[in-house]
Image (tube, rainbow, N blue to C red):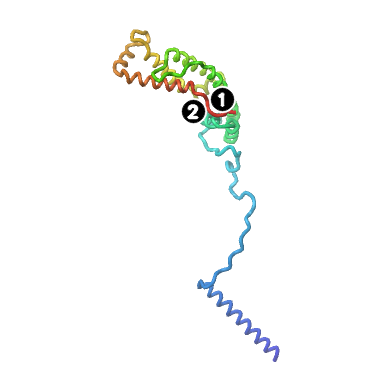
Amino acid sequence: MASLFDSKAAIGLACVVAVAVGAGSVAWLRGEGTAPAAAPTAPRAGWDGPVGPGVVATPAVASLDGPPLTDAAGNLRIDPALHTLFDGYLAKPGGAATLHAYLDQRLAPPARKQAADLVDAYVRYLQADDAMRARVRTTRPDPSGLSEQQLTDLLAWQQDREQLRARMLGAAVAQAWFGADDADCRIALEDWRKMRAAVDSEDVDSNELRARRRHGAVLEQGRNERAQACARRLLAGHSGERQ
């Protein structure tokens, strides 16, 4: 009898437990209870982001994006965009080292070596140009117009600088980077010299006389503004540290 009683008691207890568990489950499904909170996951140590080119890079090089730097043969492209890129880096402290790092990551041979050599040559040119500029003794132009002596000094200075560029950078780089601006500046200075010339001067031909009659003060003002702008560019120093 005891064993039977014990069996019945065990069965009854199991039923009670089952009913209680079932009731609890129904209550949770109806929203009458809350699920137990999941245990917090410990954060993992180390890098958990993407790894690839441009992600783990030299800290000083912010981005490897930029203009095309090579031609179809893999040689360095010498164009105004490259000049702008160089000046943008070299205008900042430590710019030469940062520019070297940037180009080293972006370029493959033979352009990589060509770019490294050009960076060094351009830095040397900028230093030589600043030294040459410091020796220029011309006075600042008066807003009313450049004097004959100032025109002579500025034209001579521009010619000296063109020769310096060709010697230190090579004729191809000098022309690609500075040729258009130099030509515009030279024309502006010569036009102002023509504007100052007397009517009976050999520099004043029929076309010049016709232009003066038609445009008068407007012609003079425009030529003066262009000559002044050229003078400012010639006399302005290079800003920033290029070491």
**Residue 115 location in percent, x, y?**
58, 29
Query: How dense is the environment of label 2, judged by Cα within 10 Å: few (below 14), some, or many (20 and up)?
Result: few
Furthest residue toward right: 2
Front position in the image: 67 or 108: 67
Looking at the rendered structure, the kind of residue marked 2 is Pro
In terms of image quadrants, where is residue 60? top right
Q: Residue at x 57, y 37 (%)?
A: 61
Residue position marked by numbered label 2 in the rendering: 80
Label whose residue precedes the other's in the sequence (2 or 1) = 2
Q: Which mark is residue 207?
A: none
**Residue 206 location in percent, x, y?**
32, 12
**Residue 187 location in percent, x, y?**
42, 18
Looking at the rendered structure, the kind of residue marked 1 is Tyr
Secondary structure beneath dot 2 equals helix
Furthest residue toward bottom: 1
Q: Which mark is residue 122?
A: 1
